[in-house]
Image (tube, helix red, strand yellow):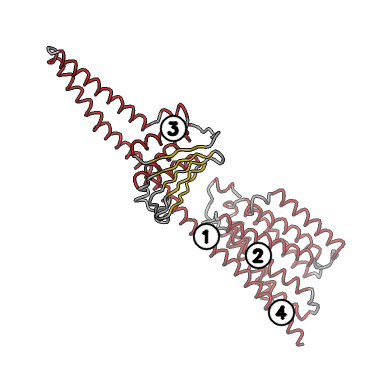
Amino acid sequence: MYTLLYIAAFSILIPVIASIRYYRNQPVYLRLLSWFLWICALTDLSSHVLAEWYINTDPSLHIYTIVEFAFLILILQPHLPSFFTVQKAWYVILLFSVFGLYNMFFLQGVFAFNSYALAVESIAMIMLTVWYFYHVLQELSEKKLTESPIFWISTGILTYFSVNLFMYIIGRYLSENSFAWAWAIIHNVNYILRNLLFFTGIWKTRKPLSKSSFLEP
Amino acid sequence: MENQEAIIQILIFGTIGMGTLVIAIILFVVVYQKKLLSQKAAAQEMELQYQKELINATFRSQEAERLRIARDLHDDLAGDLSAIRISISRLSKQMTDPDTFSNSVSHSKSMLNDSIEKVRGIARELMPPTLHKLGLAVSLKELATRLEIASGITIHYTQDEMLPVFSEEINLSLYRVTQELLNNALKHSQATGINIHLQSTPFSISIADNGVGFESEKVTMKSAPANGMGLKSIESRLQMIGANLALHTSPGKGTKAEITL
């Protein structure tokens, strides 16, 4: 169990190292992903430190969820239909932030696990990635889908949040500690899988981009 | 205890189910996208091939037209002009005999008049002067009269009042296409009568004959490049002006071609 926990904790380093190594070759949306991964790694590290000192990490999770939502929306936005403009993406982020803060202070509380915000975030991410896949089939602009970084990133987001959503729903009915290990195993495996899929996405940009494609989203 | 196991089972199998569903969605997207791309590529290839055939048909049509003009000039006009030259060169020898001289002059004049008529005919074929001066309807009416006299087949021309006025480019294309359709009808239909009607709104030209007709499946716009040269050239012209052609025919029931714009 602890081995899996360590593997999961360190798995974030795989995409983080790749994102530092290939940062110069990356278009804007992948640079956003890089920043997101670095924030993710720092949050993970701080959570482990706080947990060692028996300090509740839930308040930071409230904020992290809002930040994660904002980053993922901005990463996906350029690959969605043009109808979903940057301005609309920011409206959605603002709306979610308001909900996240309201949940933090008034709904579930600062020191409670923010399952409501996480569930809403999961539903939004599932919808956006499914929208992306639908758009891919509509546009047919990608010649080789598996060579596209955003395909792997979207796959990571969809897998991660689909399993997470199910777990948050089930989690409401898991009050006994005896189930916690099963929940933790699934969560960590899911987290490792997401990091590996993000890494694959970043790996696809290892070849330097031309000037024109660099400017593209 | 049993309850605990059941919950753990739900958690594990639910997660596996969720994961499987996601994988299935992604696999579907990848496979289906590949299939759609190959279909798109095949359709583009077909379209490209079709466009090539259209361009070839246009070139062939132009070459055929040039060949016909060359033949007309060589067989008719060149022969006549040679005869006139011979006739004029004889005149000096016939000056002593006024009757023969006068006959030769009037014969030469007559041959010159014939040649002028032939030049006019060729020019009219190339670009009907009425089309520029009096418009499409008058030109088509004149064409119908001319073809009726030449072929001996009754060609009945009717038109609505207040026909729309088009640009010269459109008029010329419509004229050429109608001419081609009429030629086809005269050559292949074995018809005894042809009706041409110009409708005002929506604008259309219909050419209907009472001939033998044909199986429309056998001659379509996108097939039969060998016998469809005329049709391809027609389609190419119509495509350029944004018009369409519909063919209604079946064996023994004549043919109706309708151009709509």
| Mark 4 / mark 1, whichever is N-terminal | 4
Label drawn at residue B139? 3
Q: Toward the viewer: A125 or A213?
A: A125
Chain hosting mark 4: B
Question: Between marks 1 and 2, how big is the CA–CA gap?
Answer: 23 Å
Label drawn at residue A158? 2
Q: Toward the viewer: A190 or A37?
A: A190
* Residue that label 4 marks: B10
Chain hosting mark 1: B
Do pointers 4 and 1 mark residues of a single chain? yes
* Residue that label 1 marks: B36
Mark 2, Cα crowd under 10 Å, few <14 / some 14-19 / many 20+, is many
Quadrant of the drawing holding the N terminus of chain B: bottom right
| Mark 3 / mark 1, whichever is N-terminal | 1
Do pointers 4 and 2 mark residues of a single chain? no
Do pointers 3 and 1 mark residues of a single chain? yes
- Badge 4 marks a residue whose secondary structure is helix
Q: Quadrant of residue B114?
A: top left
- Badge 3 marks a residue whose secondary structure is helix
Question: Between marks 4 and 1, how big is the CA–CA gap?
Answer: 37 Å
Type of residue at label 3?
Ser
